[in-house]
Amino acid sequence: MRAAFRAELDGAALIEYLPEVDDEDRVPVLGAADAVLTWFIGSELRDSEEFAALRSAGLIQLMSAGADRVPFERLPDTVAVASNAGAFAEPMAEHVVAMTLALAKHLPQNHAALARGVFDQRNPSRTIRGSVVGILGFGGIGQASARRFGALGARVHAINRSGVSDLPVDWIGTLDELDVLLGAADVLVISLPLTADTRRLIAGRELSLMKPDAILVNVARGAIIEEAALYEHLVNTPAFSAGIDAWWQEPRAHGSFATGHPFLELPNVLGSPHNSAITDSSLSDAARRAAENVARHLRGEAPLHIVDSSDYAV
């Protein structure tokens, strides 16, 4: 990642790496910064004095596409926060398709049956061609997923804030039309940010609107779905299946991984450790995109993907 930072910022800025700065110099370094590039600023600064030192920084640039862990209430009002929106879209879209195909083709169930000595060819798998893939959150990840599903012959229905899209789709609406999307989807991809409005957006009522054999894939944040409701739906509707990449309790945010319900014991669940964005090149690619946005700011241009902190007010 440092090579990516240097490639974009050498000659435009003096780069300081805060973990390498002596304790007594951290506040002065932060106070002199014109921009700060960070993964999760809340866990990387130590105290209120360090947060206050950011008042001279014009931009906090996140490496992460999500901003739900930013402690906006601790940041000076003068500082803008930019997400790294779209930085991980391509590898995450591949992960979405991989999970969907694995569940549609019953790969986890068939593998488990073979391990038990059961060779059952009578249970047909499902095809993506002709199905409706509903994409809840039609930003970079959603659109990259749509292109791949479209190539497989699926019809794409999508929801975003505006209800319009430059990328051709078969149907698009806003969150006010969520019930329409849920009822139509053979596959539901959750790829929207976790905000005050999307927390627990998918609960028991919403799951009940979905087809009994639908596939749900969540690569966004666990808290968008009500955990107990999803578990109960998977147990009570065994033809329904879920690919879960984003969990409710994860080590980076909570110190450990745990589930409130035994999802991984269910045959209709396929899990991954929130690594849909991580490939051999994705981190360096994301670092380059984030550094490019910092360079825009340093040149006096408007940085991209500025976050509205009011979206995250609880």
Image (tube, helix red, strand yellow):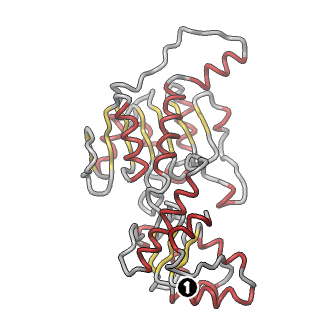
Residue 34 higher or lower than 200, as above or below:
below
Task: Using the image as rendered, state which of residue 7 and residue 41 is in the foreground.
Answer: 7
Going 55% across and 73% down the picture, which residue do you hit?
37
Which residue ends up furthest to the front in the rendered image?
11
Which amino acid lies under the numbered mark 1 shown in the image of this protein?
Answer: Ala
Q: Residues within 10 Å of mark 1 (few under 14, many from 20)?
A: many
From the viewer's perspective, is residue 306 above or below residue 269? below
Q: Quadrant of the N terminus?
A: bottom right
How many marks are shown on the rendered structure?
1
Looking at the picture, does residue 187 appear above or below residue 9? above
Secondary structure category for the residue under label 1: loop
Q: Which residue is at the front of the view, 291 or 80? A: 291
Q: Position of residue 12 (x, y in %)?
A: 49, 79
The residue under label 1 is 33
- What residue do we see at 67% from left, 38% from top? 262
What residue is drawn where x is 58% and y is 24%? Answer: 107
Percent of width and height locating residue 163: 26, 52
| Residue 28: % across, % down | 64, 91
Q: Image quarter for residue 267?
A: top right
Image position, residue 241 (x, y; %): 52, 31
Q: Nearer the viewer, residue 256 or 272?
A: 272
Can you say whether 219 is above or below 307 in the image? above
Q: Residue at x 25, y 50 (%)?
A: 166
